[in-house]
Image (spheres, rainbow, N blue to C red):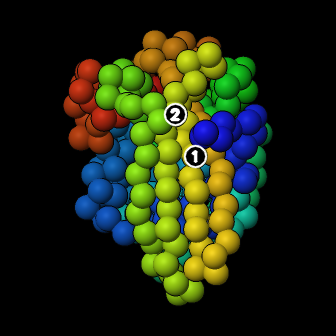
Amino acid sequence: MVKKAQNQWWKEFYDQTFGEIVLQRDNYADLDVTVAFIKKYLHIKAADTIFDQCCGTGSISHALARGGINAIGTDLIDGYIDTANKIAQSENLPAKFTAADAFNYVAPRECDGAINWYTSFGNADDDALNIEMIKRMYDSLKSGGYMAIDYFNTALKLRTAIDGDSQEFTHETDQGIITVKREFYLDFDRSMSGSSWTYQYPDGSEKTSSGESRLYMPKEIFNMVKEAGFEDLAFFGDYHGNKIGLESPRCICVARKP
């Protein structure tokens, strides 16, 4: 039986093991495509400042900062922020990261752009709570600044996902091999997509936790972004800027603060 995530599950789920396996990205080709998208569609250039909401360990902010863009990042998990700041300091990057709750945190100065990437939005089953993240992006932007929310394409997920499907893989650490089992589930009663992750550590111990995201269609995201005050909304289906469709891997909403 797959464990279902509960309200405000994220601090347990996004632990150091998940951060090391998933968030510390070494695929610079993928990051290059993401950076190019952000620069083009959010109209960001060198010396501008971008707000990276739910930044994780800061991979996108670091990539942007290497091109001379100032980055302000926030994430709830202290360990992720420590990692992000250490990388920025070791490379002398114009990036600063703060541990804070993204539902409440506003950047300390107005930014030229704001992003919420890799489906870090929509983690609550309460729409009134999720929209608070969009409002904090609005509050963090200059007038005329652009924001982007990168989400999965719910239409594709519902067509291809298999409830109860699972995968197993291993991850090598300095302490030994971690075996990971990921089980996927759909909760139609709550309109949530989730996955349960079980880690078997080298010392024989085990941990299971679950994470979820709302099954938002583009129109629902459109309505929330409009309600938060944004204008000129546009949707894209991937990091190359292609139009969203049934087969698109992503649902990316770009909008402007008036």
The residue at 47%/36% (across/down) is 164
Give the image location of residue 248, x and y in percent.
27, 30
The residue at 72%/53% (across/down) is 12
Compare marks 1 and 2 and give the one earlier in the sequence: 2
The amino acid pointed to by label 1 is Ser
**Residue at far front of view:** 1
Seen in the image, is 142 located left or right of residue 158?
A: right
The amino acid pointed to by label 2 is Tyr
Contact, mark 1 vs mark 2 (Cβ under 8 Å): yes
Residue at mark 2: 185
Seen in the image, is 207 located left or right of residue 170?
A: right
- Looking at the rendered structure, which numbered label has been put on residue 72? none
Give the camera-side residue of 232 and 32.
Answer: 32
Q: Residue 103's quadrant in the figure?
A: top right
Residue at mark 1: 196
Q: Is residue 212 above or below residue 198?
A: above
**Residue at far bottom of view:** 174
Give the image location of residue 119, x and y in percent.
50, 40
Callout 2 secondary element: strand
The residue at 67%/25% (across/down) is 125
Quadrant location of the N terminus in the rendered image: top right
Seen in the image, is 173 located left or right of residue 3?
A: left
